[in-house]
Image: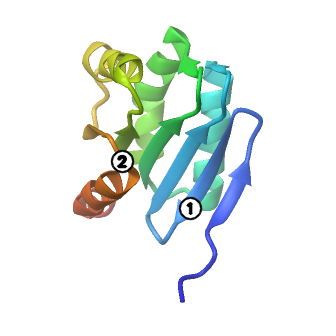
Amino acid sequence: MEPEARVIDLSSCTVTFLGADVAHTHFKDGRIVQPAEVEAMFAAIAEGRNGRKVLLMVSVGEHTTMSNEARAFASGPVSDRYIAADAIIVRDFGHQLAANVFVRHHKPMRPIQMFGDRDTALAWLHTQQHLLDA
């Protein structure tokens, strides 16, 4: 039997720790995520991982997007202290376009892939385990 996942509930998102090295951040419905909210997510990850990097799965609720400033912060050098790789779950074409902007325009310095479902995203994240030891 797997241990119960640890969940940190923030105003803009939930951070759920799935096993030893994977976390799932889900941004809540109806939000325009701002840099301070991304910073709060990073702080929750740092607390939950005792300062170790995480393999991060990201999903967003209905009618939720990130401000350009939040995307820049989430992909900037600060983010590399917390995240080894990202798996972004895209729910529709509009969300895929926004995720493409994050990846192609902001160019994070870590592996990032987009997926249509949680299981495929998790399977890919597990192939990135070696990044946690780097």
Q: Amino acid at mark 2?
A: Asp
On screen, residue 64 above or below 51:
above
Using the rendered image of the protein, determine whether residue 112 is visible from the camera's viewpoint: yes
How many numbered badges does the structure rendering display? 2
The tag on residue 17 is 1
Looking at the image, tell me whether mark 2 or mark 1 is earlier in sequence order.
1
For the residue carrying disc 1, how many other residues have a C-alpha within 10 Å: few (<14), some (14-19), or many (20+)?
A: many
Residue hosting label 2: 117
Q: Amino acid at mark 1?
A: Phe
Rounded to the nearest angstrom, the CA distance separating label 2 from label 1 is 18 Å
Q: Which residue is drawn at the image coordinates 77% and 35% (left, top)?
A: 11
Q: Position of residue 39 (x, y in %)?
A: 62, 32
Q: Are marks 2 and 1 in contact (CB under 8 Å)?
A: no
Quarter of the picture containing the C terminus is bottom left
Q: Which residue is drawn at the image coordinates 40% and 26% (left, top)?
A: 75
Q: In this orientation, which residue lies closer to the viewer: 112 or 1?
A: 1
Q: Residue reaching furthest front? A: 92
Tell me: 39 left or right of 65: right
Q: Position of residue 70 (x, y in %)?
A: 54, 19
- Secondary structure at badge 1 equals strand
- Secondary structure at badge 2 equals loop
Q: In this orientation, which residue lies closer to the viewer: 81 or 117?
A: 117
Q: Position of residue 94 (x, y in %)?
A: 39, 16
Quadrant in the rendering for residue 92:
top left
Using the rendered image of the protein, determine whether residue 134 is visible from the camera's viewpoint: no
